């Protein structure tokens, strides 16, 4: 008897925590199926799957659903820009007019580097915490 079966018998199924599911980009309903194909940073561009392989959740719940993640992504970008600007200052770049283009270059490079991260986690924030009626439900896991 394997661990999952034993857990079911004792009514203590192996639960995946919300943070673990979020950080590993798993489906918000079953927390087992992956939402994205490919790595966040890699030569192959990451793509989002249409449905969860484990519980058949359709990730795009209605047409244009992920436009909302644009607002999340915007907020993440603002936070990253402030962080990069403050970090550059703390690390010794004085706030004088001659250094303007250094700040612009650092922030622009930072935004480019963070963009795959923002793409992935803005959609995950939307699915995990901004979608009413979408909750962890291990009973929806397909039986094999
Ligand atoms: Zn799922």
Image (spheres, grey):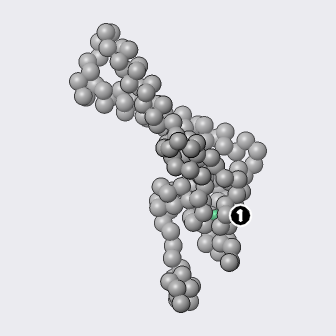
Q: Is 79 located above or below residue 5 in the figure?
A: above
62 or 132: nearer the viewer: 62
Where is residue 18? Give x, y as percent. 50, 62
Q: Can residue 98 be spotted in the picture?
A: yes
Question: Where in the figure is residue 79, as x and y percent of width and height?
Answer: 43, 35
The residue lying at 30 percent from left, 26 percent from top is 88
Q: Which residue is mark 1?
A: 56
Q: Is residue 130 in view?
A: no
Residue 1: where, in percent of width, then height? 53, 90
Residue pictured at 26% horizontal, 18% vertical = 94
Residue found at x 56% / y 85%: 5
Residue 105 as seen in the image, left or right of residue 93: right
Q: Residue at x 52, y 85 (%)?
A: 2
Image vertical order of residue 68 relative to residue 105, above or below:
below
In the drawing, does residue 77 fall left or right of residue 93? right
Confirm if mark 1 falls within 8 A of ligand 1.
Answer: yes
Q: Quadrant of residue 84?
A: top left
Q: Residue furthest left?
A: 92
Q: Identify the residue at the far right of this view.
A: 63
- Quarter, ligand 1: bottom right
Q: Front-most of 68 and 59?
A: 59
- Quadrant in which residue 133 is drawn: bottom right
Secondary structure beneath dot 1 equals loop
Residue extending farthest top? 98
Residue 43, given in percent of the width and then of the height, sits at: 53, 42
Instruction: Give the crowd class for mark 1: few <14, some 14-19, many >=20 residues within 10 Å.
Output: some
* Number of marks present in the image shown: 1
Figure quadrant of the C terminus: bottom right
């Amino acid at each position: 008897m394997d661990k999952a079966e034993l857990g079911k018998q004792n009514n203590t199924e192996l639960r995946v925590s919300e943070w673990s599911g979020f950080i590993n980009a798993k489906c918000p309903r079953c927390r087992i199926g992956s939402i994205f194909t490919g790595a966040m940073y890699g030569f192959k561009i990451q793509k989002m799957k249409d449905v969860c392989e484990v519980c058949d959740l359709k990730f795009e719940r209605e047409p244009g659903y992920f436009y909302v993640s644009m607002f999340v992504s915007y907020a993440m970008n603002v936070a990253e820009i402030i962080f990069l600007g403050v970090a550059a200052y703390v690390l010794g770049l004085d706030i004088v007019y001659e250094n303007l283009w250094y700040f612009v270059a650092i922030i622009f490079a930072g935004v480019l580097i963070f963009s795959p991260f923002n793409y992935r986690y803005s959609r995950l924030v939307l699915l995990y915490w901004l979608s009413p009626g979408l909750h962890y439900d291990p009973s929806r896991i397909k039986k094999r």
